[in-house]
Every structure is written in structure tokens, then in C-alpha cells.
Image: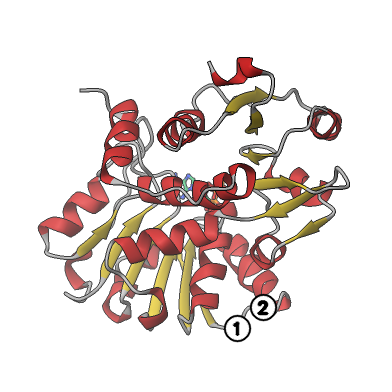
């Protein structure tokens, strides 16, 4: 085992619970593939212990860590510097240890989402009008990312309309420039006629959750559909969209692509997201 050399470069994922995280398998795959003496460890951090754990990781010489639910906002507050995506999204999902022992914060969920779109043959900079279902943390990052990539118009629909209004307001205050439209959740079918990308950021359609009820009949033929839910890999929304001939983009790709910048910063190699990696992680989600 690489970690037993005593010299292994260390990184991990901080969350609670963290046992379900696919990130260790993903990073261990790359460590092995590139022959790197490193280890990536799931770190189940008790409530209230986040800042102490960061100090400990720094003392132990960890190169950094990913941060997942429920600590992305605490990570945002704890870092000593951050990238533009973290500033705008208010969430840090990647920590990189600096020479002085402090951690720099990145948000790689946003570039991961955009890269996943590109891999699915959807160019974010060519979009004219995207609609986002949901207004939670994921929606905030995705709205920011689409706007910053050049999508000029974004419609937000959320069960709790007020949260969509606050989201748009927050992004505008942070300097994100796009025209934001806020619509009632009940209008999700009728707004489809004028958009070229539909993104589901709610958990509707996830295994064990309620279905997402939406009729895609009026979605323009050239419009693409993306779901950030990746269990099942192909959600009912994506299945329906594909059957109607739309381009579809699976959520798993976002998870794979968001991991790239962290691995590169910690271990010094820019890893590749390959079909083989996709299939290995997909098999962990839905074992045959
Ligand atoms: P994340 O960080 O993944 O975005 P979140 O912040 O908990 O998660 O956001 C979940 C999103 O799914 C919210 O937009 C939520 O709507 P509310 O703001 O009204 O809670 C949405 N959501 C969850 N369950 C839903 C349901 N049954 N119907 C519609 N939207 C739902």
C-alpha cells in the first residue's frame, strides 16, 4: 500500500457521512494509474470539529482535501484565500495547503459542471437561455458558472420561489452578470419553449426520491438536458429527453471532472477523465 512508505502525499475528503463518497475510488484509481506515492482518505468529521481537523491535516502535512456535505460553507469561511468560483458560489469543495500551512479554497464543482457539458457536446459559451430547476447550493454554482461562461439569460424555478429570488440577488451582488428570470415551480413545463438548456439540480428523480414531473413536449429540438443526479446514472428526465432526441448530459461526469483540479494541485499530475474511469465509478453506483 502506497501510504505505508511513510512518504506518501496525503489528501482526502472531509464530510459527514463520508462513507458513500465516490471520491476515494476516483482518486485511488488515478494514483495507481499515474504511479504516484499518495493516498486519498475519507475523513468522517464530527459536527463542530471542522476547524480543528483542518489544523490537524495541516500539521500532518496533508496536501489538501475535498470538502463535501455539510462542510462546504464552513470551508469557505476557514480558508485564507480562494478562487473566483468559490467567492461567487459561497462554497469551497477543494482545499489546497499553502507553504505557510494555511489552506487555499477552490470551487471545482462549477468548472466540473461546465467541462461535463463540453464533454457532452454542449458549449456553455454558445447558450442563449438556460433554465435551472432548484435553488440550493448546486443551483447557485451552476447559475454562476453558466453566467460566467457567457449564457446571457437564466430562468430559475424553485419550489420555494423566494430562495430563487435570493439566489439571483446574491449572484448579481457578487457581480455575476446575466438576466435572471424567476418563475414559479408550477411553470416548469410552460417555460421550456424559449430555452436551449434545462438543468435539474433538485434531488427529484434520484433513487428513493420523488419523481421530477415535467413534460418536455415544448422543449425546442436543439435544446440539451442535464441532470446533476447520478443515481440512477440515466435519470427518468434524461431518458425522456433522449427519447425525444435531445442531447443529454449525465450527472456523473460533473463528479469526475470536479476532481481533476484537486488531484493536479495535490499530486502534480493533471489526470484524465476516461471512459474506463467512468465505467468503474458507474459500476459502483449501479452494480451489475
Ligand atoms: P444542493 O446543495 O444539492 O443544491 P439543497 O441546497 O438541499 O441541495 O437544495 C435542494 C433543492 O431541491 C432545493 O431547490 C429544493 O427546493 P426548496 O428550496 O423548495 O426546498 C429542491 N427540492 C427538494 N425536494 C423537492 C421537491 N419535493 N419538489 C421540488 N423541489 C424540491
Q: Position of residue 74 (x, y in %)?
A: 77, 44
Q: How crowded is the residue under tag 1: few (<14 C-alpha within 10 Å), some, or many (20+)?
A: some
* Residue 172 numbered mark, or none: 2
Q: Position of residue 70 (x, y in %)?
A: 66, 37
Q: Which residue is mark 1?
A: 177
In the image, 278 versus 211, the foreground residue is: 278
Q: Is residue 15 visible?
A: no
* Residue 102 numbered mark, or none: none
Q: CA distance from mark 1 to mark 2?
A: 6 Å
Q: Residue at x 60, y 25 (%)?
A: 42
From the viewer's perspective, tell me whether residue 252 is left or right of residue 214. Answer: right
In the image, 203 versus 197, the foreground residue is: 197
Q: Residue at x 44, y 35 (%)?
A: 26
Badge 1 or badge 2: first in the primary sequence: 2
Is residue 125 placed above or below 25 in the rendered structure? below
Disc 1 under 8 Å from ligand 1? The reply is: no
Q: Disc 1, disc 2: CB below 8 Å?
A: yes
Q: Position of residue 117 (x, y in %)?
A: 36, 63
- What count of labels does the image hold? 2
Q: Is residue 210 visible?
A: yes
Label 1, secondary structure: give it: loop
From the viewer's perspective, tell me whether residue 161 is left or right of residue 214. Answer: right
Which quadrant: the C terminus? top left
Is residue 205 placed above or below 117 in the rendered structure? above
Q: Position of residue 158 (x, y in %)?
A: 50, 59
Q: Residue at x 46, y 31 (%)?
A: 22
Q: Residue at x 81, y 50 (%)?
A: 79
Amino acid at each position: 500500500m502506497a501510504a505505508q512508505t511513510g512518504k506518501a502525499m496525503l489528501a482526502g475528503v472531509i464530510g459527514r457521512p463520508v462513507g458513500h463518497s465516490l471520491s476515494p475510488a476516483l482518486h485511488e484509481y488515478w494514483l495507481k494509474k499515474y504511479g504516484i506515492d499518495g493516498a486519498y482518505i475519507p475523513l468522517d468529521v464530527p459536527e463542530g470539529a471542522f476547524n480543528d481537523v483542518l489544523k490537524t491535516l495541516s500539521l500532518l502535512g496533508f496536501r489538501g482535501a475535498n470538502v463535501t456535505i455539510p462542510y462546504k460553507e464552513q470551508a469557505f469561511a476557514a480558508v485564507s484565500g480562494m478562487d473566483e468560483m468559490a467567492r461567487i458560489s459561497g462554497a469551497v469543495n477543494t482545499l489546497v495547503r499553502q507553504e505557510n500551512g494555511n489552506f487555499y479554497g477552490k470551487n471545482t464543482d462549477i468548472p466540473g459542471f461546465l467541462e461535463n457539458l463540453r464533454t457532452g457536446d454542449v458549449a456553455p459559451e454558445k447558450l442563449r437561455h438556460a433554465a435551472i430547476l432548484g435553488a440550493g447550493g448546486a443551483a447557485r454554482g451552476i447559475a454562476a458558472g453558466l453566467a460566467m461562461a457567457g449564457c446571457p439569460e437564466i430562468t430559475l424555478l424553485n419550489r420555494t420561489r423566494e430562495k430563487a429570488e435570493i439566489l439571483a440577488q446574491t449572484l448579481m451582488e457578487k457581480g455575476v452578470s446575466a438576466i435572471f428570470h424567476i418563475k414559479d415551480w408550477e411553470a416548469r413545463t410552460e417555460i421550456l419553449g424559449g430555452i436551449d438548456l434545462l438543468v435539474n439540480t433538485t434531488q427529484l428523480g434520484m433513487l428513493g426520491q420523488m419523481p421530477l414531473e415535467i413534460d418536455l413536449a415544448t422543449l425546442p429540438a436543439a435544446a440539451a438536458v442535464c441532470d446533476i443526479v447520478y443515481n440512477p446514472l440515466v435519470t427518468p428526465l434524461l431518458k425522456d429527453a433522449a427519447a425525444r432526441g435531445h442531447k443529454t448530459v449525465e450527472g456523473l461526469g460533473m463528479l469526475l471532472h470536479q476532481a481533476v483540479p484537486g488531484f493536479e494541485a495535490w499530486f502534480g499530475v493533471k489526470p484524465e477523465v476516461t471512459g474506463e474511469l467512468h465505467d468503474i465509478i458507474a459500476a459502483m453506483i449501479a452494480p451489475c
